[in-house]
Image: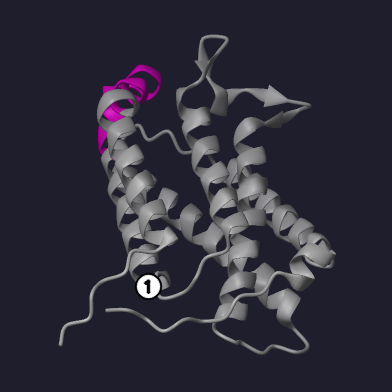
Amino acid sequence: MRTERVFKGLDYFALFNIALFLGMTVFVYYDRFIEYRGPANIYEFYIYAVVIIIFVVLCWWYFRRFTAPVYLLLLIQIAILLHFAGAFIPIEGGRLYDAVYLGIGFDKYVHFINSFIVAATFNEIFHAMNVRIPVFRNIVIVMMTLGVGAFVEILEYLVMLTVEDVGVGGYHNNMRDLIANFLGSMLFLVAMQTRFFQTNRHKKQQYVP
């Protein structure tokens, strides 16, 4: 007897954001990208769009077997909206991503916040999969978060090597991104000591094929 497929919150979350991303890409993102980065960089646009969609689908496929906490989905949604805001909101003739606040570029704030969220995600994955790391747990969370950030920087580097007139920044920008990632993950370690993260636990559920 065939088991009926059960839709979970993560299913709706993934479908909504894939639809949102595709809609924004078709109706807004393409034109904005051409306006601010020029038609010569259009291949960069397609590469990032495809990678993002593949990443979201793979994450959804693997993690739908778990119950994602509502707070974590909200944090991830904030990260997604920050990305859209940085790309689409015009500031003084440029993008919000190009704006500087308190001497720090908006994109660095995005890196900082996203790294906090990535660290929180790894923390929840450890709980869901019952991963026991008694001594170096915090270090592992930070290093895995930095690994995700490093993978993004590697992707940008590969784009720079294969696409002419790419809009990726240089070495200085790369290091500032990684520093922001590190600080964001460290902030999560501080937040993890609060009662909210100490008591918020969920168990792995049986996967429904």
Of residues 84 and 91, the one nearer the viewer is 84
Residue 181 image offset from top left, x and y in percent: 66, 54
**Quadrant assignment, res 176:** top right
Q: Is residue 61 left or right of residue 97?
A: left
**Helix, strand or loop at disc 1?**
helix
Which residue corresponds to the image point at 37% horizontal and 35% vertical from the top-left?
166
Residue type at mark 1 is Tyr
Which residue corresponds to the image point at 32% horizontal and 51% vertical from the top-left?
15
Q: Residue furthest left?
A: 1
Residue 41, magenta (yes or no): yes
Q: Is residue 90 above or below residue 189?
A: above
Q: Is residue 182 left or right of residue 114?
A: right
**How many marks are shown on the rendered structure?**
1
**Quadrant assignment, res 115:** bottom right
The quadrant the N terminus occupies is bottom left
Residue 30 image offset from top left, x and y in percent: 29, 27
Which residue corresponds to the image point at 33% horizontal and 21% vertical from the top-left?
38
Which residue corresponds to the image point at 16% horizontal and 83% vertical from the top-left?
2
Q: Is residue 201 above or below residue 136?
A: above
Residue with the mark numbered 1: 62
Q: Which residues are magenta?
A: 30-44
Q: Is residue 49 left or right of residue 126?
A: left
Residue 160, magenta (yes or no): no
